[in-house]
Amino acid sequence: MADSYHHGDLRPALLDAAARLIRDGGTDALTLRALAEAVGVSRTAPYRHFKDKAELLVAVAAEGFERLRAALRAVNASGAAGLAPFEAMGVAYVRFAVENPAHYRLMYGREALARREVPALQTTADAAYYELVALITAGQASGALRTGDPEALAYVAWATVHGLASLLVDGQMEQPDDVEALARLTARTLLEGLAG
Amino acid sequence: MADSYHHGDLRPALLDAAARLIRDGGTDALTLRALAEAVGVSRTAPYRHFKDKAELLVAVAAEGFERLRAALRAVNASGAAGLAPFEAMGVAYVRFAVENPAHYRLMYGREALARREVPALQTTADAAYYELVALITAGQASGALRTGDPEALAYVAWATVHGLASLLVDGQMEQPDDVEALARLTARTLLEGLAG
DNA sequence: ATCGCCATGTTGACAACGTCAACTTAAATC
DNA sequence: GATTTAAGTTGACGTTGTCAACATGGCGAT
């Protein structure tokens, strides 16, 4: 089946190769033709599995959200107490972004997204976000965090960590040697507040 | 000179038209051919003023940074005391992003940026960032903010506000009716901290 | 067993895009 | 007034996403 007319398992093979192309060469490297060639198939074969290039990008992004969610879930599952898990989740989030920059940009960028409304993608993204909300509500229950609308707190926390990730991933600042330390500092500053 | 062979004032006309195209149709609408036609000139005329499409995008982004800096500078110039200016600057920043989404994405995205190192662009961007740093150091001097490395505090503040702007601009959340209130809430939460 | 269906894959073509090379125009300089 | 040269034009090329028409072969019904 290696060189038969029908590939037999093309869709997952395409997603795998797409992730690899994006990782190695950035978003620009993910061209349908290069992707098809990487899998050993003709240029238009992907159209049997994805309506569009955009639809393929959505699928790649969804797979990224799964991985991000797994990373955040691990923090929640660790059962750490106090403020430690907040730092840990911030670090996990930023680390994912820095280790998968093009993937992260695709997930939270506009390219694949709003232009086609894909509920499945939103669901997957929400699942990742929910890990953060769960951490916040647990923190409030234990008294580690102040009271208030957990959605609002989660939103600010998300914005902060996403902002840091975006700045790093888009090369807006010189990336420091120790990204983890920067993420930890950011999380702590967010917890303690800026006001005197 | 309207329909003469030489346009006479092409470069600024291109930048104007580019900003308009981006505002109306998003980044995708900014194609060199459409741009040239909008100005009434042949497709390759822009090459006399910009080496590349990328170089043109850099110029558009730089102009955006100028406008953003002006908006932030107005907050600093207002001379408000206490914590009010921090909310005001957060609001001004987010408002700029929401009102110029494609422009903002271009400024802080990767398309035009790291792929060609343009010191002039970095300088302009730094000038905008400096407005935030200035506000932070002033806040520390007046005792409104806690002590500590002002660069670090500014960095967290920037990440938060940029994260919020990015989420809104990239359509990651349903955009609320009152963006200003959300920005204000975010700024206040950042000031007060999440911990209990 | 075999026939036909249809999901899967291929080939050829097209328009849009960024960009280069060669040419044209007219404004500026001596 | 001649010439240099900045500014603009035309034609072409390679790359990309995508469509239409065609080819293949695995699978169920007979």
Image: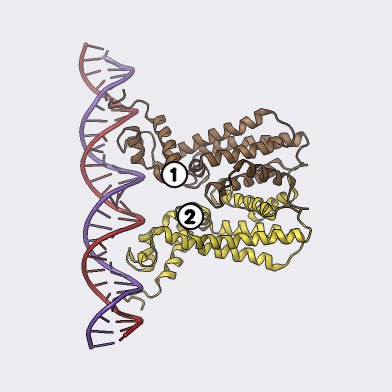
Chain colours: A brown, B yellow, C red, D purple
Q: Circle 2 marks a residue in which chain?
A: B
Say what secondary structure mark 2 lies in: loop
Q: Quadrant of the C terminus of chain B?
A: top right
Give the quadrant of residue C2: top left
Other residues around mark 2 within 10 Å, as few (<14) / some (14–19) / many (≥20): many
Asked whether, in this view, residue A93 is left or right of residue B36, the answer is right
What residue type is disc 2 on?
Leu
Q: Residue A128: horizontal and vertical position, in percent?
A: 59, 36
Q: Residue A73: horizontal and vertical position, in percent?
A: 62, 31
Q: Which residue is mark 1?
A: A26
Q: Which mark is residue B69?
A: none
Say what secondary structure mark 1 lies in: loop
Q: Using the image, determine if residue B8 lies above or below residue A30.
A: below
Give the quadrant of residue A29: top left
Residue at x 43%, y 44% (from the top left corner): A27
Q: Residue C3: horizontal and vertical position, in percent?
A: 21, 19
Q: Circle 1 marks a residue in which chain?
A: A
Q: Using the image, determine if residue B99 lies above or below residue A98.
A: below
Residue at x 51%, y 43% (from the top left corner): A101
CA distance separating discs 1 and 2: 14 Å
**In front here: A1 or B126?**
B126
Q: Which residue is mark 2?
A: B113
Q: Are marks 1 and 2 on the same chain?
A: no
